[in-house]
Image (spheres, grey):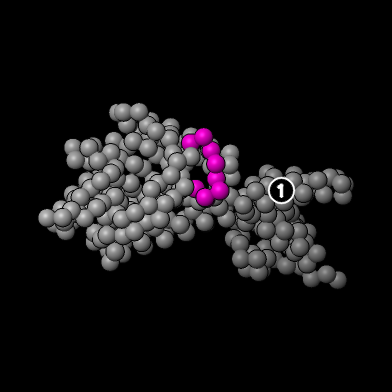
Amino acid sequence: MQKKYKINEIAGFFKISRQTLIYYDDIGLFKPKFVDSETSYRYYGEDQFSNLRFILILKEAGFSLKEIREYTKSRSPEESLEYLEEKKRLLDLKIKKMIESKFTIGKKISEIKNIMKKDDIEPQIIYLEPMKAIGIHIEKPCNYLKYDKTFSDLLNIKEEINIQEDEYFVRVSKEDIILGKTMEVKILGFVAPTHCNHKNSLEIEGGWFASIMHKDTWDTIEESYEKLLGYIEDNGYEVVGDSIEFFNEVIVHLGKGEGSTTQIVFPVKYHER
């Protein structure tokens, strides 16, 4: 004779509450094998274990009790197969989104750790090789609406030509920087592979640059510009072109505002005194 299990035994074995089993019984999702007419005690059989285990698996995967109950009411193998295949498809989509979310969170963690490191923020002179890029001009005055629209257009271009790189840049004119208009973006674009050709293709000229890493919120970037311009003047260099800010698409919240690691560079030449 098959062993009968009390509701508390089943609850303990499956690590669920007694109230959960009572609720499953009330809604017709998982009913006991036998109910004592005198004591109203619920008893379950071993042959019900696999069914309850599968119900809990579906519930843990995020399916509602209503959806699970639909499966238990399947009237044929074909109906059961159709239901499970659809749930697997939905679960695959959910897993894909979770993997993408995990990847995004991982990038944000790395970015915050990078911002917290302050051992590479001092100005310096560096040499940059020429770079192929794709950029879009923004008409003055630049505002957040124009910037966001342009960035959206860039993302469409990246998708169109299947570019995976995520290094972006903005170009700000030397004149606007001197006037303190660091947000007056002239060109917004992204660095592209050398073989890439597009109507918006352009080249970032190589050469010697004064560089500084800005690791703070965007609204403080003017301070980094002032520090870099002071370094250029103090060390006998002269700015000979527009500034370029290199950044990635990872935006993080820093408590006092949003920001990202941004490398600011100015093309320079040594000024004989």
Going 38% across and 48% down the picture, which residue do you hit?
205
* 50 is within the stretch colored magenta: no
Main SS, magenta residues = loop
Name the residue at 48% across, 40% down.
201
- Residue 271 relative to residue 119: left or right: left
Write the start and end of the magenta stretch as one range: 192-200
Residue located farthest toward the front when viewing the structure as drawn: 272
- Of all residues shown, which one is farthest toward the left? 273
Residue 194 lies in the magenta-colored region: yes
Horizontal side, residue 233 vs residue 62: left or right: left
Residue 232 percent coordinates (x, y): 19, 54
Horizontal and vertical percent position of residue 234: 14, 57
Q: Residues within 10 Å of mark 1 (few under 14, many from 20)?
A: few
For the C terminus, the quadrant is: bottom left
Above or below, comparing residue 2 to residue 221 in the picture: below
From the image, which quarter does the N terminus lie in?
Answer: bottom right
Instruction: Judge by depth and name the residue closer to the eye, 209 or 114.
Output: 209
Amino acid type, label 1: Arg
Tell me what residue is drawn at x 68 percent, y 47 percent.
90
- Tell me the residue that label 1 is attached to: 89
Hey, which quadrant is residue 16 in on the image? bottom right
Please state which of residues 101 and 219 is positioned toward the viewer in this rendering. Answer: 219
Q: Secondary structure at mark 1?
A: helix
The answer to whether any part of residue 165 appears in the image is yes
Give the x, y percent position of residue 86.
Answer: 74, 46
Q: Residue at x 42, y 59 (%)?
A: 109
Q: How many marks?
A: 1
